[in-house]
Amino acid sequence: MSILWTVLSKAPLTEHRPVSGPAVYGFLRLVRVSRARQDALVTSLTEYCRSHELQLSGVFTDRDAASGPASAAFTGLPDV
């Protein structure tokens, strides 16, 4: 038995099924980064998720360089 996969187009995978995309959360560590750069990164992350059929449910941002993995933004991710 053989299986043949044919890609006809780059249409969204869920185009024929009414399903919502997997929920994902973003984490940005932004030390000494302008608000404009932060906004651009969030926009880029949003577009990436849209193009890969992912639902961006939130973005956590950490601006404290010394906090490391104990930062409130990072440790808050598992709570959602």
Image: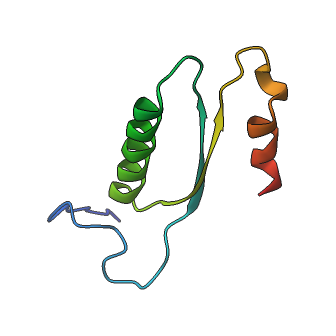
Position of the N terminus, as image quadrant, is bottom left
Specify whether 6 is left or right of 23: left
Is 12 above or below relative to 26? below
Is 6 above or below relative to 76? below
Is 16 above or below relative to 5? below
Q: How is the image coloured?
A: rainbow
Is 25 above or below relative to 23? above
Point 85% across, 27% down: residue: 70
The location of residue 19, given as percent across then percent down, is 47, 80
Point 40% across, 62% down: residue: 53
Image quadrant of residue 31? top right
Q: Between residue 23 and residue 58, name the one nearer to us.
A: 58
Specify whether 48 is left or right of 60: left
The location of residue 16, given as percent across then percent down, is 32, 83
The location of residue 12, given as percent across then percent down, is 29, 67
> Looking at the image, which residue sits at the far front?
35
The location of residue 74, given as percent across then percent down, is 75, 36
Q: Between residue 29 and residue 33, name the one nearer to us.
A: 33
Q: Between residue 8 and residue 37, name the one nearer to us.
A: 37
Point 47% across, 33% down: residue: 35
